[in-house]
Amino acid sequence: MIHKAMTDYKNKSEDGKVEIIVNAAQKRFAHFGLCKTTMNEIASDVGMGKASLYYYFPDKETLFEAVITKEQNVFFDEMDKVIHSGMDATTQLKKYVKLRSLFFRQLLNLSKLRSDFFYNSKPVYNKAFERFNKIELEMVSTIIQSGITSKEFKRINKNEYAEFLVHLLLGVRLVKLKYKDINEFDMNDYEDLDKKSCRVAGMFLKEIVADAS
Amino acid sequence: MIHKAMTDYKNKSEDGKVEIIVNAAQKRFAHFGLCKTTMNEIASDVGMGKASLYYYFPDKETLFEAVITKEQNVFFDEMDKVIHSGMDATTQLKKYVKLRSLFFRQLLNLSKLRSDFFYNSKPVYNKAFERFNKIELEMVSTIIQSGITSKEFKRINKNEYAEFLVHLLLGVRLVKLKYKDINEFDMNDYEDLDKKSCRVAGMFLKEIVADAS
């Protein structure tokens, strides 16, 4: 209901082949990164001719997009659990911030992405990211709405504030990427990101939590 | 004292020629942007041979850097006034946020920059931006320190929080640039940026202002 795009994706892979290819590609990308992985290797991994592979995925970028989409869906599944957990909205928002940080880290590990990937991504990735942004905003909105309904949060504009939080966190990541190349990210950087994201979440919550009365 | 780099720059232009060239270049860049301006035109504007111009500035990028530095110094002069105004620290921080937004706008107008300029800038610009970031951080730290001293603010780590605020605002701008090309920026985008920057400032101040007791 919340993320229709996700169901669409799942329908597409009904014949099983797509899923097998995507799983193999995911492993390759995770170990060797996007640039160092070839379509030949993936075809060989799944015991398929190159022509058959191209039947399913016209190029490496499209296949990479499918892998990203799969990773995104894992994040959305986790978020879905949080949203339906019955936890209070404040806790849900904190969980979101943690899961979002983790997802960013996984995506970086997956692809050993170059930093310009995030800035000037090709249309094919844009499609995956647009879908992601849309669903992410809807989910954060849903949490904020539940907090408004339960009177935990002030009666704010849920969409406006969802966008504000999502963009603040994105800003924290973009600033980090501006000062440091993705390929040089280490544990300290991830910890720094987590710390800053948590601080942003804390500030944001102070802003929207209803005054005790 | 706070911004030594600024004094250094001023010393360099003692012979007057540099200043004349930079002023001419600034006008050209503001009207036609970086890409459409040639060194020939600037030489002609100041009634100078191309060889003489190259004596002062080896290439267009170096000249552009000098123009940026000049613009930065205008911002720093304004900030200097704020810091020495005797206003309370909260007001000073709000002024900083306004001036910073304005400076961003001026820089965009100046250069009709392409958005990748901000992401993958050449070393020559990096030098100007590094210098800027350093001085900006020092100035915001100074304001926070004055707020701590006057007991307006909590006893926080001034450098850590200065960086946090500066980066939050940078994040707001980077997110905007991610979703919209600089060349398509219009009044609404600037207003949106101002609004978001103000909201960030408000949240940040709530976080650091000392509890009334």
Image (spheres, coloured by chain):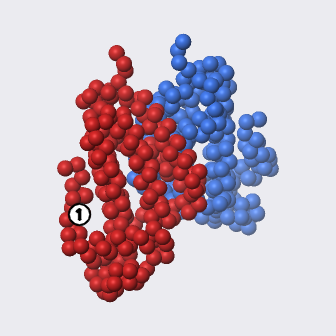
Chain colours: A blue, B red
Residue B65 x/y as whole percent: 35, 67
Say few, some or many: other residues with alpha carbon within 10 Å of mark 1 (under 14 / 14 to 19 / 20 or more).
few
Q: Please indicate whether residue B109 sits to the left or right of residue B24 in the image.
A: right
Q: Residue at x 35, y 70 (%)?
A: B23
Q: What is the quadrant of residue A58 in the picture?
A: bottom right
Amino acid on which the number 1 mark rests in the picture: Lys
Of the pair B181 and A56, the residue shown nearer to us: B181
Q: In the rendered view, would you say B202 is above or below A171? A: above
Q: What is the quadrant of residue B50 in the picture?
A: bottom left
Can residue B108 be seen by looking at this rendering? yes
Q: Please indicate whether residue B23 sits to the left or right of residue A138 in the image.
A: left
Of the pair A132 and B64, the residue shown nearer to us: B64
Can residue A171 be seen by looking at this rendering? no
Which chain does tag 1 point to? B
Q: In the rendered view, would you say A65 is above or below B164? A: below
Q: What is the quadrant of residue B55 in the picture?
A: bottom left
Q: Residue at x 50, y 65 (%)?
A: B112
Of the pair A18 and A129, the residue shown nearer to us: A129
Residue B135 x/y as whole percent: 29, 51
* Quarter in which the C terminus of chain B is drawn: top left
Q: Residue at x 43, y 28 (%)?
A: B206
Residue A156 x/y as whole percent: 61, 29
Q: Please indicate whether residue B1 sits to the left or right of residue B46 in the image.
A: left
- SS of the residue at dot 1? helix
Q: In the rendered view, would you say B115 is above or below B52? A: above
Q: Residue at x 31, y 78 (%)?
A: B58
Find disc 1 in the rendering and name its residue. B10
- Total numbered labels: 1
Of the pair B191 and B145, the residue shown nearer to us: B191
Residue B67 x/y as whole percent: 36, 66
